[in-house]
Image: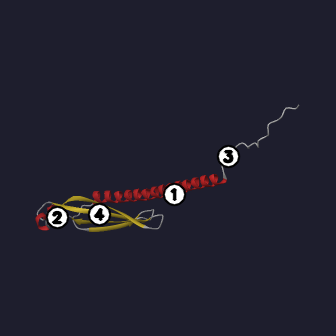
């Protein structure tokens, strides 16, 4: 007699290793969204750095003009000046007699010094074409012209 074999059961195929098409599509979409967000952050950072560089240059221009005014302003009469820098930025400067809120013009007329308010404004066109400006101010005491002798 021949040994009897047990009836064979259908064999299952081993589970497939890897990812389904749906999983690959979802993963690709997530990576794409993260990439776009990172590029937007990078672009924003470059834009901000460019604006900061423009403002720093304008402040250097304004400081240079203000230093010239502080050194060379010797008259106590209001004046206005203007000019242009090599990079196309325009500057405007003015000086005027300064009175604080608690002072009146009459109360300071007999003092030997005149307080002058110096203003410098620098205007330029940004890389995007927008007009921008910075302004700085300072006070300077000047010997009153009637006190000079």
Q: Earlier in the sequence, mark 2 or mark 3?
A: 3
Residue identified by numbered label 3: 18
Residue identified by numbered label 2: 101
Q: In what element is the residue under mark 4?
A: strand
Is residue 139 depicted above or below 2 in this figure?
below
Locate the N terminus and report the quarter of the image it occupies: top right
Do labels 4 and 1 touch, CB within 8 Å? no
Residue under the image location 47 percent in, 67 percent down: 129
Residue identified by numbered label 1: 40
Q: In what element is the residue under mark 1?
A: helix
Residue identified by numbered label 4: 119
Residue at the limit of the structure toward the front, as seen here: 1
Separation of marks 2 and 3 at Cα, in angstroms:
79 Å
Q: Earlier in the sequence, mark 3 or mark 4?
A: 3
> What colouring method underlies this structural image?
secondary structure
Residue 145 shows which numbered tag? none
Q: Earlier in the sequence, mark 3 or mark 1?
A: 3
Classify mark 3: residues with Cα within 10 Å, few (<14), some (14-19) or many (20+): few
Separation of marks 3 and 1 at Cα, in angstroms:
33 Å
Q: Nearer the viewer, mark 4 or mark 1?
A: 1
Q: Nearer the viewer, mark 4 or mark 2?
A: 2
Q: In what element is the residue under mark 3?
A: loop
Q: Nearer the viewer, mark 3 or mark 1?
A: 3
Location of residue 110 by image quarter: bottom left
Location of residue 55 by image quarter: bottom left
Separation of marks 4 and 2 at Cα, in angstroms:
18 Å
Classify mark 4: residues with Cα within 10 Å, few (<14), some (14-19) or many (20+): many
x and y percent of residue 92 in the render? 34, 66
Q: Nearer the viewer, mark 1 or mark 2?
A: 1
x and y percent of residue 39 in the render? 53, 55
């Amino acid at each position: 007699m021949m040994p009897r074999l047990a009836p064979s059961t259908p064999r299952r195929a081993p589970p497939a290793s890897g990812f389904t098409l749906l999983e690959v599509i979802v993963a690709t979409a997530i990576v794409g969204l993260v990439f776009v967000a990172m590029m937007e952050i990078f672009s924003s950072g470059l834009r901000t750095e460019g604006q900061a560089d423009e403002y720093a240059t304008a402040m250097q221009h304004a400081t240079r003009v203000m230093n010239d005014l502080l050194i060379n302003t010797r008259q106590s009469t209001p004046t206005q000046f203007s000019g242009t820098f090599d990079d196309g930025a325009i500057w405007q400067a003015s000086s005027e007699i300064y009175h604080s809120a608690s002072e009146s013009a009459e109360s300071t007329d007999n003092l030997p010094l005149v307080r002058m308010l110096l203003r410098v404004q620098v205007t330029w066109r940004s890389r995007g074409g927008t007009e921008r400006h910075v302004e700085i101010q300072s006070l300077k005491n000047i010997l009153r012209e009637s006190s000079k002798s």
